[in-house]
Amino acid sequence: MSDLLVAPRRPGGRGSDVGRPRDPGMDRSILAATIELLAEVGYARLTVADVARRAGVSKPALYRRWAQKSQLVVEAMVTQMRPARNSETGSAAGDLLFLTEQLIDILTRTPLGRVLPGLVAEMATDPELATSYRELIIRPNQLEWRAAVRRGITSGELSAGTDIDFVLNALAGPVYFSLLITGAPIEAGYARSAVDLVLARFGTAARA
């Protein structure tokens, strides 16, 4: 559990910060225990008591850090969203392919994919949870994807008029649609096909 990074602070999401300084090692243990239990039982069956027991901490100690289960789960999910390596591959096509494949891997091979439908349902009635999820998970990843598209524009691989939002939606949207709506498996060649479509629309080589 010691290798797990502590998630960024959630605005208004933690429990009380008043009192003695928090132990980062305890934070990591709690987050790691949360990830393990999410993989085993899913979001609905996960309880704060089980997380505390698995992490070897008291429930009051956990609640001092995270006031609600949903807050804890979002911050635990942040630890799953960290890229394995730098997304700059040397080309726009390579960058976008890497990011798309990384997203698919995260949503199909980590606990995030299993618990995301439950989190989305909770977000409908919990504005703080929705804000936390968007600020800690969605926004940082969007920034990375946007940077990749802008690098492609700067290098001349993508046209100056490339619609960045369209590119992000075209690549990531169907992945979330499959996970949250249809439940259909994501085809093995999806990432490459999606990037090829983007390049066909906005790539300068396709227009040469």
Image (cartoon, rainbow, N blue to C red):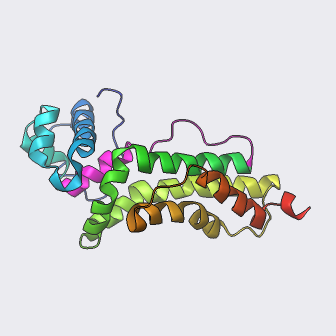
Query: With 25 as the anchor, is 185 left or right in this view?
Result: right
The residue depicted at 39 percent of the width and 64 percent of the height is 180
Instruction: Find out whether residue 77 is within the magenta segment.
Output: yes
Query: With 91 as the anchor, is 59 left or right in this view?
Result: left
Image quarter of residue 69:
bottom left
Assign the magenta stretch its main secondary structure.
loop
Is residue 18 in view?
no
The outermost residue toward the right is: 208
- Image quadrant for the N terminus? top left
Image quarter of residue 135:
bottom left
x and y percent of residue 192 in the render? 66, 52
The outermost residue toward the top is: 2
**Could you say which is closer to the camera, residue 21 or residue 177?**
177
Query: With 9 as the anchor, is 145 left or right in this view?
Result: right
The outermost residue toward the bottom is: 125
Instruction: Find out whether residue 167 is within the magenta segment.
Output: no
Query: With 51 as the anchor, is 172 left or right in this view?
Result: right
The residue depicted at 59 percent of the width and 38 percent of the height is 86
**Could you say which is closer to the camera, residue 40 or residue 163?**
40
Image quarter of residue 67:
bottom left
x and y percent of residue 138 in the render? 45, 59
Q: Which residues are magenta?
A: 67-91
x and y percent of residue 191 in the render? 61, 52
The residue depicted at 27 percent of the width and 61 percent of the height is 118
The residue depicted at 13 percent of the width and 47 percent of the height is 48
**Could you say which is closer to the camera, residue 35 or residue 195?**
195
x and y percent of residue 2 in the render? 31, 26
Is residue 179 in view?
yes
